[in-house]
Amino acid sequence: MSYELTLILAVSACLSLALMFAWVVEKLTGNGGWVDVIWTFSTGAAGAAYGLLPPDGEITPRGGLIAAMSLLWGLRLGLHLVGRASRHRDPRYIKFREQWGKGADARMFRFLQMQAVAAALLVMTMWLAARNPAPGLTVMDWAGVAVFALSLFGESAADAQLAAFKRDPANKGKVNDRGLWAWSRHPNYFFEWIIWLSYALMAVNLAGDWSWGWLAFITPLYMLWLLTRVTGIPPLERHMEQTRPQAWADYKARTSVFIPLPPRRRGQS
């Protein structure tokens, strides 16, 4: 078995074990928010492993940069999620258990293993970028860094704005429509999606020496599907419709669902 295949299988196995641990934590605490914490930290570490464990043992500038980006992303988002999970339970996981009934434990286990598979597929983008044979750092690498920096700043700002809104007791039962949240109903998800595009850019070799790099764009497309169709926006929007029906309907009528756009005026289609 080749070194690269062994590394990929080992990283994937570690992600599976991490989500098994997340299943135990969720079952014992009843708080699915810790699942997202564990997923984020383990995914960040897995991406860094691909940058720091090249087959010849010599870490390239690109590999080191990818590892730093992956760890920074995982640390920033993971700590944010720690704060959120320590304050309240994630309504998505509560809803899952209500829907699944007596078979909730088994279905939750399978669901979290699917998240492990998703993480393993996502971090392949880091592998493809880290194995780009282009010497040094190219214009595509710097383009990826620029996109990453912008996305990390945007996601951090969106999270901070939402946290500040929730801390004000006067906003209980209301919908945050301030800052980036006036332009998108889910700006944090939008910038999270763009972050994965940064690694795909770094996987591209304009000299044509790494045609596999173009496959890295599958990951941001996959993340876009997950966020907008599966685990991100749909369950959250259903929760908001149930808990704040009128306020959410008004907000929804004037605010872009995903891509930040100027708010629509009343009567504007």
Image: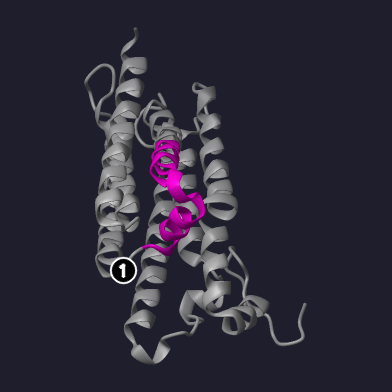
Q: Could you say which is closer to the camera, residue 52 or residue 184?
A: 184
The location of residue 229, given as percent across then percent down, is 60, 52
The quarter of the rendered structure image containing the C terminus is bottom right
Whether residue 267 is visible, yes or no, is: yes
The answer to which image quadrant residue 170 occupies is bottom left
The answer to which image quadrant residue 214 occupies is top right
At horizontal 59% and vertical 63% (from top left) the residue drawn is 259
Q: Could you say which is closer to the camera, residue 16 or residue 262?
A: 16
Question: Overall secondary structure of the magenta stretch?
Answer: helix
Asked which colour scheme the image uses, the reply is one colour
Magenta-tinted stretch? 90-114
Classed neighbour count for the residue bearing mark 1: other residues with Cα under 10 Å, few (<14), some (14–19), many (≥20) = few
Q: Is mark 1 on a helix, strand or loop?
A: loop
Tell whether 128 sits left or right of 164: right
Question: Is residue 46 positioned above or below 240 on the image?
Answer: above
The location of residue 197, given as percent across then percent down, is 49, 46
The location of residue 199, given as percent across then percent down, is 43, 41
Residue occupied by mark 1: 88
Tell whether 257 sits left or right of 131: right
The quarter of the rendered structure image containing the N terminus is top left
Membership of 64 in magenta stretch: no
Tell whether 253 sits left or right of 10: right
Membership of 104 in magenta stretch: yes
Question: Is residue 217 positioned above or below 82 on the image?
Answer: above
Q: Which amino acid does label 1 sit on?
A: His
Q: Could you say which is closer to the camera, residue 185 or residue 28?
A: 28
